[in-house]
Image (spheres, rainbow, N blue to C red):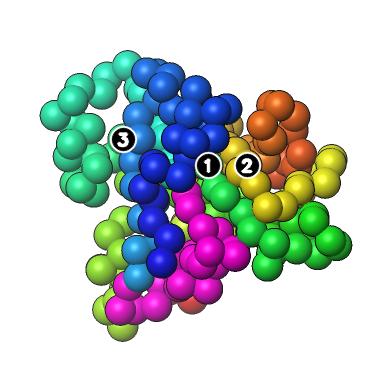
């Protein structure tokens, strides 16, 4: 089963170089961990194999206020990070193709939806997954819309960069986030704008 182990990316020069950027901090991707509630099963199980998404790694931009001790607490989910940017690296396999050698557009959109949601997760806007297992638990923020633009083919198999940046937050219940997928040359292959909302009551 694939993990967020950095080892597969260290052999990819362009990713390895980006991982050395000290303005970013590496963090585990929580949606790759299987949960008894079945939350995150899409990324922890269905899309977690040697021919789909075989490896992934995330980094967030270091906020000025974040000390090493606060990062340690954040990494364990006890303190929100408060970053405006998240970048994730993925190795995509050919079982995710639409046309030969080209990633299916639906998977590209799914990756951008996932990474924009992960930005909310690490910032503490989603809450503890274990608390959502209760019958009367409030749901976390949900995607209200995801407007996507496909600019160039995303080739497989290979590594891609999926980034998310916070653009606007309102009333602590609405978040507008932009995402993009880039290749090894830094070319933007796809973009998206997402709006997440926190529902006022359970669905």
Residue 68 is one of the magenta-drawn residues: no
The residue where tag 3 is placed is 81
The residue where tag 1 is placed is 89
| Residue 110 image offset from top left, x and y in percent | 64, 59
Quadrant where the N terminus is found in the figure: bottom left
Q: Is residue 48 above or below residue 192?
A: below
Q: Is residue 5 above or below residue 39?
A: above
The residue drawn where x is 41% and y is 22% is 20
* Residue that protrudes farthest toward the front in the picture: 11
* Residue that protrudes farthest toward the bottom in the picture: 135
**Disc 3 secondary structure class:** loop
- Range of magenta residues: 35-56
Dot 1 alpha-carbon crowd within 10 angstroms: few under 14, some 14 to 19, many 20 or more: many
| Residue 114 image offset from top left, x and y in percent | 54, 54
Q: Is residue 169 visible?
A: no
**Disc 1 secondary structure class:** strand
The span from disc 3 to disc 1 (Cα, nearest Å) is: 20 Å
Specify the label residue 160 is tagged with. 2
Dot 2 alpha-carbon crowd within 10 angstroms: few under 14, some 14 to 19, many 20 or more: many
**Residue 120 or 20: which is nearer the viewer?**
20
| Residue 85 image offset from top left, x and y in percent | 49, 31
Q: Is residue 52 visible?
A: yes
Q: Is residue 70 above or below residue 196?
A: above
Instruction: Give the side of residue 127 with respect to residue 157, left or right.
Output: left
């Amino acid at each position: 089963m694939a993990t967020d182990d950095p080892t597969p990316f260290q052999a990819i020069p362009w990713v390895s170089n980006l991982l050395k950027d000290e303005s970013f901090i590496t963090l585990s991707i929580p949606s790759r961990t299987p949960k008894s509630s079945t939350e995150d099963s899409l990324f922890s199980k269905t899309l977690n194999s040697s021919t789909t998404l075989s490896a992934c790694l995330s980094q967030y931009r270091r906020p000025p206020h974040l000390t090493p001790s606060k990062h340690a607490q954040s990494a364990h989910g006890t303190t929100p990070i408060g970053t405006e940017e998240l970048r994730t690296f993925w190795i995509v396999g050919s079982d995710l193709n639409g046309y030969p050698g080209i990633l299916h557009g639906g998977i590209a959109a799914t990756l951008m939806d996932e990474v924009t949601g992960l930005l909310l997760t690490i910032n503490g806007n989603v809450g503890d997954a274990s608390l959502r297992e209760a019958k009367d638990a409030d749901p976390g923020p949900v995607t209200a819309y995801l407007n996507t633009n496909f600019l160039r083919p995303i080739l497989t198999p290979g590594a891609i960069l999926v980034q998310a940046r916070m653009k606007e937050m309102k009333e602590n219940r609405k978040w507008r986030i932009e995402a993009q997928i880039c290749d090894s040359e830094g070319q933007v292959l796809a973009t998206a704008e997402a709006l997440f909302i926190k529902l006022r009551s359970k669905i």
